[in-house]
Image (cartoon, helix red, strand yellow):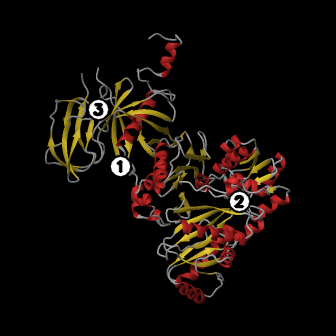
Amino acid sequence: MPTAAHRYVLEGPEGPGGSFELWVEPLGDGRLRIRPGAALAGAPVSSVEVRPGPGGGALVPVEVGGRRRLVGFARLADGRYQIVWEGVPRVVAIADPGASASLATGPAGAAGGGSVAAPIPGMVVKVHVAPGARVTAGAPLVVLYAMKVENDIRAPCGGSVAEVRAREGQPVEKGDLLVRIEGGP
Amino acid sequence: MFRSVLIANRGEIALRVIRACRRLGLRAVAAYSDADAWAPHVCLADAAVRIGPPAPRESYLRIPAILEAARATGAEAVHPGYGFLAENAAFARAVREAGLVWVGPPPEALEAVGDKVNARKLAAKAGVPTVPGVEDISPATPPEALEAAARALGGPVLVKARHGGGGKGMRRVTDPPDLAHAVREASSEAASAFGDGAVYLEKLVDRPRHVEVQILRSRGGETVALGERECSVQRRHQKLIEESPSPAVTPALRKRLEAAAVAVAEAAGYENAGTVEFLIPRDGPAGSFYFIEVNARLQVEHPVTEMVTGVDIVAEQFRIAAGEKLSPAARKPARRGHAIEARITSEDAGAGFLPSTGRIEALRVPGGPFLRWDSGVEVGSDVTYDYDPMLAKLIAWGETREEARLRLLSGLRELTIVGVTTCVPFHLAVLASEEFARGDLDIGFVARPWVAAALRPTRSPEAEAVVTALAHARRSAPNGAAAPSADGRSLWGREALREGLRTP
């Protein structure tokens, strides 16, 4: 039974233009792996394990990357979430969590699911995978040259590569489909 | 001493006054608007009276409603806190005429120092230096005369409201020909804000430090000065961080500032607690200072003085109002260590201090030695646009300034307020800065370019991961139920197991 991952789209402090994806993969025991999906340059590139502690209030203990912290957390009247992390309050819009797809079971749609899109405009300099290849979550798929650096675009989830649109040497726009992954046994 | 006090205020200062009542064995009566029906000050008081709708004009500023509340509850004295009616001579008079004790300066003293031109004259007569200025101007003064006055002062000037405060009715003018226009504007702004359009001119002191002296004066004329506070970290005339003592004041300068403050208080026939404000010019001769004005009330930042002197200033206010002598502690105030206060406002420092409203969902107050938390909100409090955005004050004491600074920083990192955005990131950035640590302050501090850069919203991958994880966990455990515990069962599941409602 493959693990289902859930996709969330977060709005960065720059507003809707700065949206990026995070994937939440339950690991059992209440632990969740948070992995960046199609992300802005400078977005977190490594995944982190988060375990919410007991309690359902607005002040909750959380273990993140092995450290435990008491954090403030609430859904505000406007539907956005507030997090108070080490004294600093942040308000984050998490777009339509209800639309998150279960990758392992559902087909990957063009707008979500296992679609890996270019997070920023750039040039594809390397394609690591071919259709039919098996990938694990976090595996490098494509290298995108943008903003003077090579950015590793990694698999948001495990599965098999259903489609590869990225071509080496080809420029892409933000949001262009690069690779589509489907879950499987 | 009277036995019961009506507190004509709200928020943290109402709670502060209630606590002083408790210490002296006085009955505390709260007054509240509809917006504050369940506010902490209402819940802490011995009795509480509704005084009107949320708008201050219809409640906290409505003199007949407040006097009626005092009458109905048998209160014998009225404490006005700060803001609202605290420096309103007509209110002080009405309180006395109703046969109640006014906990504040007599109406005549309020009038004497409330007129800033008069206060300047009193100070000058008492031999206290004032900022060079021109007092006999008005919108009717011919432009040539205004221009000549500005040139005589030299350099940029400030147009100030004679009966104003909080930066209203104030204009900065660099070019003398612009003065006539600025005078008209300042005057009409002052007229609408304070009901009096009188203005005067002061030479602009370039990026000075704001230093003020706390005084107490009994009816018998005994005056003590409780040292100074530096309040240079301010934004649009609203102070954000205050400390005592000032890192810029030497013992010799302190003596002279205190003597000047006492002289002004005596010249004004002052009574009760008050603050005499000074500017210390950046490039002036060593030890120079100018009187600017008197704040005839208890001030927001009074706790830093309490922390270093050991004097309960509100309790002294009650003593003085009852005609008693100052307490032994006030007559021989300690001078120990350093205290710094951070005002916690519901403002988004990263968005130009945009006010933030909402319900306080959670509140974790820092602990540890020598930290003081004076708050007007608790979990469940609604923060609305009706009132000032100041929620609370966090004050830290230390043997040295550095110790106080680090203790306050540590407290701010622990402080967690959920439901509104607060200015805590501003305090974290400033208190951690090398410039603040050095005591390199002036009233232009907040405008220094690095401050804005430090407040620009930034991403935090950790915070983003945590907020997403929690949003996910709550969504998968509906009804806001407990997140799964370490053994993978919900709290309900474990509870059910224990109660024998279900099998493992």
Chain under callout 2: B
Q: Secondary structure at mark 3?
A: loop
Q: Nearer the viewer, mark 2 or mark 1?
A: 2
Give the alpha-carbon distance from disc 1 to disc 3, as whole Å: 23 Å
Q: Where does residue A131 sit, x and y in percent of width and height?
A: 16, 32
Q: Is residue B414 visible?
A: yes
* Residue position marked by numbered label 3 in the rendering: A108
Count every numbered label the image shows and give the total.
3
Q: Is residue A98 visible?
A: no
Q: Which mark is residue B136?
A: none
| SS assignment at label 1 | helix
Are tags 1 and 3 found on a single chain?
A: yes
Disc 1 marks a residue whose amino acid type is: Gly
Q: Nearer the viewer, mark 3 or mark 2?
A: 2
Query: Mark 1 highlights which residue?
Result: A18
Tell which subunit mark 3 falls on.
A
Q: Which residue is mark 2?
A: B86
Q: Chain of mark 1?
A: A
Task: Tell me which residue sits at (20%, 46%) in the image.
Answer: A144
Foreground of the two, A148 or B122: B122
Image-based side of B244 in relation to A99, left or right: right
Q: Position of residue B480 (x, y in %)?
A: 51, 30
